[in-house]
Image (spheres, rainbow, N blue to C red):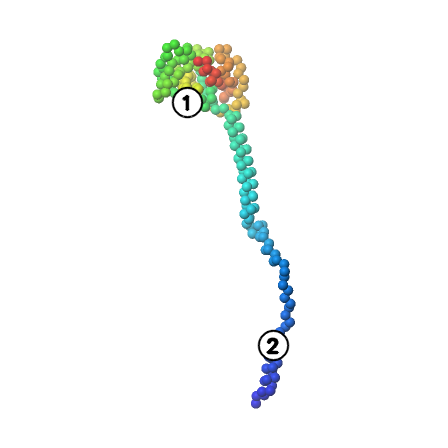
Amino acid sequence: MVDLAKIRKKAKKVLGGAAEQPPSLPVVESTSTPAAPAPLDDSTTGRLDDSTTSSKLDRFKEQAGKRRTAAETKAVEQTAALLELLTFVIAGEQYAVDIERIVEIVTPRSVTRIPNADSSVLGIMSLRGTIVTLVDVRKKLGHAVGAATDDTRIVVIDFHNETVGFVVDRVQRVVKIPASTVEPHPVVHTNELQESIRGVFRVSGALTILLDLDKLLDHT
């Protein structure tokens, strides 16, 4: 037989145990503002925030700009300290002029003499429609008249917005030399115009006279 009394008794014990709850902890309400989350550490995330990136970029630009300026200044100084010259021979003497003044180097061609012109002016010639005044630089430098050869050339230059040419016995080459290597002009030839010579320097052991074209041609 089922003992109903025992079943009821067990049921009461089970229900009574489920009804009992453990004591709850008191709830304390905080009146302070919750702390903001700590910023990420760039060293751990491997990423820079915008302000840090901007400041570093600005510093880089400033420093890089200074370095470029210094490099450019140095390059300009080095370029300014170099002379680029055309060397040529007249009457066995080696001369040079600044290549910036040179327009062209051509072979000899027919020259038209100008009546009543200065004795240092040989005449005029046409160079592709441009009138070139041919000056006797050989005579200005005190050299005797020389015969033309296969090496004879006419050096055409810009002289105060006028096109002027002069005959040389032979064109050699273009050289670049430090300005500091040009020495004061010694007495090279008694007939040479002293004021027309900027100085002398050596190329491959040969003494070369650096001419001042402005002063040389001003006597024309």
Q: Residue at x 63, y 72 (%)?
A: 22
Q: Residue at x 54, y 30 (%)?
A: 74
Q: Is residue 117 visible?
A: yes
Q: Is residue 138 visible?
A: no
* Numbered tag placed on residue 215 in the rendering: none
In percent of width and height, residue 193 lies at 49, 13
Q: Residues within 10 Å of mark 2 (few under 14, many from 20)?
A: few
In percent of width and height, residue 149 lies at 39, 16
Q: Earlier in the sequence, mark 1 or mark 2?
A: 2
Residue hosting label 2: 19
Q: Amino acid at mark 1?
A: Val
Residue hosting label 1: 103
Who is closer to the viewer here, 144 or 100?
100
**Which quadrant does the C terminus fall into?**
top left
Mark 1 or 2, which is nearer the eye? 2
Q: Residue at x 53, y 15 (%)?
A: 186
Who is closer to the viewer here, 115 or 97?
115
In percent of width and height, residue 17 lies at 62, 77
Mark 1 touches mark 2? (CB < 8 Å) = no
Give the side of residue 80 with respect to residue 128, left or right.
right
Please determine whether, in this image, residue 21 is positioned above or below residue 28: below
Q: Amino acid at mark 2?
A: Ala
